Image (cartoon, rainbow, N blue to C red):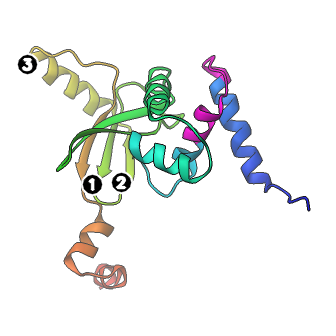
Amino acid sequence: MHMAIPNTVVQGEVRIVERLRAVQLRPTSARIGILQLLTGGGQASLNAEDVYQQLQDSGIAVSLGTIYRVLRELEAVGLLLREREDSASGNKARYWIKPEHAEEGSCYFVCRVCERKVLVQDEALMQQLRQVAQVHGMQAGGNLVSMQMRCSHCSDVASGIRRTDRLARSVV
């Protein structure tokens, strides 16, 4: 029995292969699998161990060492972004897909609960941050700046406020 592959899946994989070739990387199963996980997964960002486990669960056999190497490669060529996450189990790197429209030195607000990311495109703010870094003897690199916060949805959930309650208050 022949099952048809949904057109959106094929288009997504073609797009991933195009992005890999654009940065002169061969589209291996590990690279494609990692990019598919990060573009289509429910989580906004993943650490290397999560990527490894999810690839294993989906039937893609790849070593944890390969996962670390590919994540570093994809970050180095600008397809992924990395941020450090402090947790009870230590400091881990989390990766997510770099939006195509994001420029070097962009700023993101990141919800620490749901991991939703919002790109802040404010050149004046970025210039001010570079100036403050320079005053303190630091050189601003090309990396993105991320500020961890809690989005209004997650704040409402934490405080027991339903979205409909918040909307009703804003209408009054």
Res 35 → quadrant = top right
| Image quarter (top left, top right, bottom left or bottom right) of the C terminus | bottom left
Rendered image: mark on residue 115? 2
Q: Position of residue 28 (x, y in %)?
A: 65, 29
CA gap, disc 2 and disc 1: 5 Å
From the image, tell me which residue sits under label 3: 136
Image position of 134 (left or right of 94) = left
Q: Nearer the viewer, mark 3 or mark 1?
A: 1
> Is residue 8 placed above or below 32 in the rendered structure?
below
Magenta segment's dominant SS is helix
Which residue type carries mark 3?
His
Earlier-in-chain disc, 3 versus 2: 2
Asked whether residue 36 appears in the rendered view, the answer is yes
From the image, tell me which residue sits under label 1: 112
Q: Residues within 10 Å of mark 3 (few under 14, many from 20)?
A: few
Q: Position of residue 3 (x, y in %)?
A: 86, 60
- Residue at coordinates 43% horizontally, 51% vertically from top-left? 44
Magenta region: 21-35
The reply to whether discs 2 and 1 touch (Cβ–Cβ < 8 Å) is yes
Image position of 23 (left or right of 136) = right
Which residue type carries mark 2?
Glu
Q: Residues within 10 Å of mark 1 (few under 14, many from 20)?
A: some
Q: Nearer the viewer, residue 20 or 102?
A: 20
CA gap, disc 3 and disc 1: 27 Å
Res 12 → quadrant = top right
